[in-house]
Amino acid sequence: MSEIQKLNFDIKLRNHIWFWGSYFTLNFLRWGAYFNDYDYSFKSNLIEFSLHIPLVYFNLFVLVRRYVLKQKYFKYTIALLVSLFTVYLLKTALTYYIISENIWPEANREYQPFDINHILAVCIGELYVLAMASSVYLTLTWLRERERNRSLRENQFKIKLKYLENQIQPHFFFNTLNNLYALSLESSDKVPDVIIKLSNLMEYVLYDVKGTKSVPLIKEIDYIQNYIEIEKLRFKNVEVAINLESNIEDIKVPPLIFISLVENAFKHGGLNNQNLKIKINCKIIDHKILHFEILNNFVISQKNNPKGGIGLVNTKKRLKLIYKNNFSLKYKTKLNYYIISLQIPIHNED
């Protein structure tokens, strides 16, 4: 339920005092100048505002909450009319006994209490103040609620994005540790090299990109190359070519956004494949779009159906959170090659 629906008294007290104090001062000066009688204007406004203020808050926090928000409009109308008549009685009595027996000197003629014109004039005046003060309050409350919702959406976005990033990283390291385990079973002398390279990858993930929204693309390429070197230790026959067709020195990208695409190429291309071939193309289109493409061959069989796993699913979710619909991620097969193409807006380093 929104703050406007709950109508909480959450605007700071000093703002209420400032509003009523300013309104009282302007009214006092206005009518004092109009009648050239500031003493009468001060006393009259003092009585009126002592009734305006309770009526406004009674309407906002009792009548509106009890009747309007529950769509009981007839009851609200009756309650408001009773409140206005009560205010009329109080204003008339206070004016008569404190200021003057002439209860409506502004009319330039003497009126008696309960005259229909006097009743209408007082009630219309109260409705004017009621409408103005309520409009100011509801507008400020709406602005506060809008800002609160914006902040909430940003926090939800950050939490969801962090959750997806945390899913991707353990997923990657789990696969790498499996590679290391396989080598250790073979008592391979490549194990120390794998451990060093894995340590470098972990350092990048845990320290270099932690808490950052974007990183230089060149560092992401270095990270991918280190990952490829680890995978080359696992696969006996693998050829990987990285083709950078543009100057990428100043380009920044979300961290770890490409690694799932590379993982997917090794995961699905390496099954029953004695000669795995992977090609990575990276280029800038019209100085606006980063095009990242990865191709891998695969052995066609019933067991090897190249498709994205959790890594690709999470990558797509991350892209949607970061870029909304301003990106393109496509998958296709051509002959015995599986191709993933990603296009995202580029950001230059400051």
Image: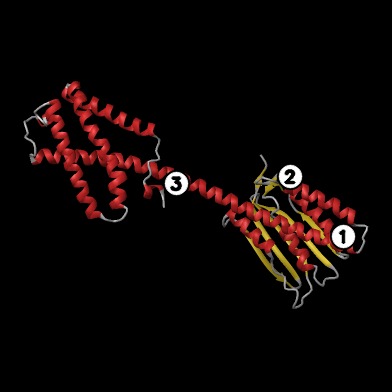
Q: Nearer the viewer, mark 1 or mark 2?
A: 2
- Inspect the image, locate mark 2, and give the three-letter code of the amino acid beneath it: Tyr
- Cα distance between the residues tagged 1 and 3: 54 Å
- Say if mark 1 contacts mark 2, CB within 8 Å: no
Q: Earlier in the sequence, mark 1 or mark 2?
A: 2
Three-letter amino acid code of the residue under disc 3: Arg
Q: Which residue is mark 3?
A: 146
**Where residue 288 appears, x then y in whole percent?**
63, 50
Q: Residues within 10 Å of mark 1 (few under 14, many from 20)?
A: some
Task: Give the image location of residue 5, x and y in percent.
Answer: 37, 50
- For residue 104, say whether it is visible: yes
Q: What is the CA distance from the residue labelled 3 to the residue labelled 2? A: 36 Å
Q: CA distance from mark 1 to mark 2?
A: 25 Å
| Residue 247 in view (yes/no) | no
Q: Secondary structure at mark 3?
A: helix
52 or 239, which is in the foreground? 52
Q: Secondary structure at mark 2?
A: helix
**Label located before the other in sequence (3 or 2):** 3
Q: Which mark is residue 41?
A: none
* Residue denoted by label 2: 207
* Badge 1 or badge 3: first in the primary sequence: 3
- Which residue is denoted by mark 1 in the rendering? 233
Residue 211: image location, x then y, percent: 66, 45
- Residue 102 figure quarter: top left
- Residue at 85%, 50% in the rendered image: 196
